[in-house]
Amino acid sequence: MSASPTLRVGMIGHAFMGAMHSHAWRTAPRFFDLPLTPELAVIAGRDPQSTAAAAAKYGWAESSTNWRELIERDDIDLIDICTPGDTHREIALAALRAGKHVLCEKPLANSVAEAEEMTAAAEEAQARGVYSMCGFSYRRTPALTLAKQLVDEGRIGTIRQVRAQYLQDWLSDENAPMTWRLDKTKSGSGSLGDIGAHIIDAAQFVTGSDIAGVSALLETFVTRRPLAGAKVGLGGSGDLAGEYADVTVDDAALFTARFENNAVGIFEATRFALGRKNAIRLEINGTLGSLAFDFEDMNVLEFFDATLPAHVQGFQRILVTEPEHPYTANWWPAGHGLGYEHGFTHQVVDLVRAIGSETAPTPSFRDALGVQRVLQAVETSAAANSAFTAL
Ligand code: SOE
């Protein structure tokens, strides 16, 4: 690793994203030359024992249960927010005010109002040389970065249609326990913000055009769920007995969209697609060709080139592992493939390089505010239900 100046990181949260971001901070300087060397200084959580255990497991020098104190430390340069959405605004505003760079998990916030406040603070801080990024990591999957490159090269011509899905199935079982992701006060929304935000960002990133309007439908299939570890079942009356909680968010979000470049799109985000584990699918149809991606086959990008002679046309499977592809030269020889975690490492690489070169990282909080506006528009459209015609 280069003997570059350190970038001392304080991370808040140590669940799934905390574990993943820890891996990315540890790994990035070992595979990429960086202008600053990340130091896993402090990990913060609510419980002293579990946070100390996370520090030992993920390689953090210290643990803390006081994120406010962490943000005020002079020996911390960047705050990485890996907590549920209801805490993003307070933590990010405090960190930016304290002159700390910020990486904030997606979605940026639980409302447009919060996201607007965070964006204003981020842009004011940037004038002081304090940078921020929102963690839409899938755009840094090499195949999706390549898709954007091919669109920008004009390889598929004018974009006509976008087809985007994010399919998971971990809530298909109606007895799967309650989680913060199903509580609107914590998560802001359900599938829509948790995974729909990813395909909104990916579609806007790859096409280079923002969504201008939507028509939406939201559905909650299971409205009450057992608390984790609770003894539940049917009581004498045949009704649910035991400790249950109300699900206050969507289980599935479906919407059509029109982009500012007049392309039209169809989006689906659900955690009930039994059998689909983490299927982010993006297909883009243009006038000269099409692109298709499925995260469950994440090292491949399919490309249909309509400029070829008809007898050799067909979707080609580009194995995105050649050194000429985005990010891949720093990893393994062609054909050996990358995984879910690599997008997070690439996210750290690009953030650290942006900070080191004093340039604004992307996706910015303003980019993430754009996603937040789409989330709000979907909820507004679904509530109005105006596009629905009963038969
Ligand atoms: C749960 O749906 C989840 O962990 C999302 O919150 C992440 O953003 C996604 O990368 C994997 O699935």
Image (spheres, grey):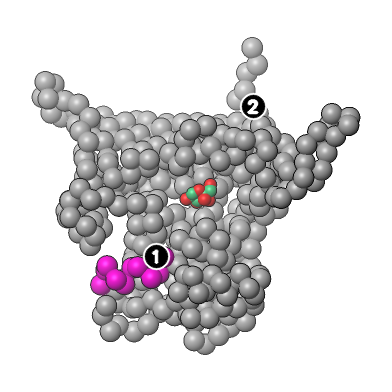
Q: Quadrant of residue 261?
A: top left
Is ligand 1 less than 8 Å from the beta carbon at label 1? no
Q: Secondary structure at mark 2?
A: loop
Q: Tell me where residue 207 appears, x and y as whole percent.
A: 35, 42
Nearer to us: label 2 or label 1? 1
Q: Does the magenta stretch mainly form a helix, a strand or a loop?
A: helix
Q: CA distance from mark 2 to mark 1?
A: 44 Å
Look at 53% across and 81% down and name the residue there: 62
Label of residue 289 in the image: none
* Residue pointed to by mark 1: 24
Q: Nearer the viewer, residue 218 or 70?
A: 70
Label 2 or label 1, whichever comes before in sequence order? 1
Left or right side of 334 for 158: right
Quadrant of residue 114 within the rendered picture:
bottom right
Whether residue 298 appears in this view of the structure is yes
Which range is magenta? 23-33
Can you tell which quarter of the image residue 260 is in? Answer: top left
Residue linked to disc 2: 386
Amino acid type, residue under disc 2 in the picture: Ser
Residue, x 65% and y 41% (percent of image)? 176
Q: Is residue 361 magenta?
A: no
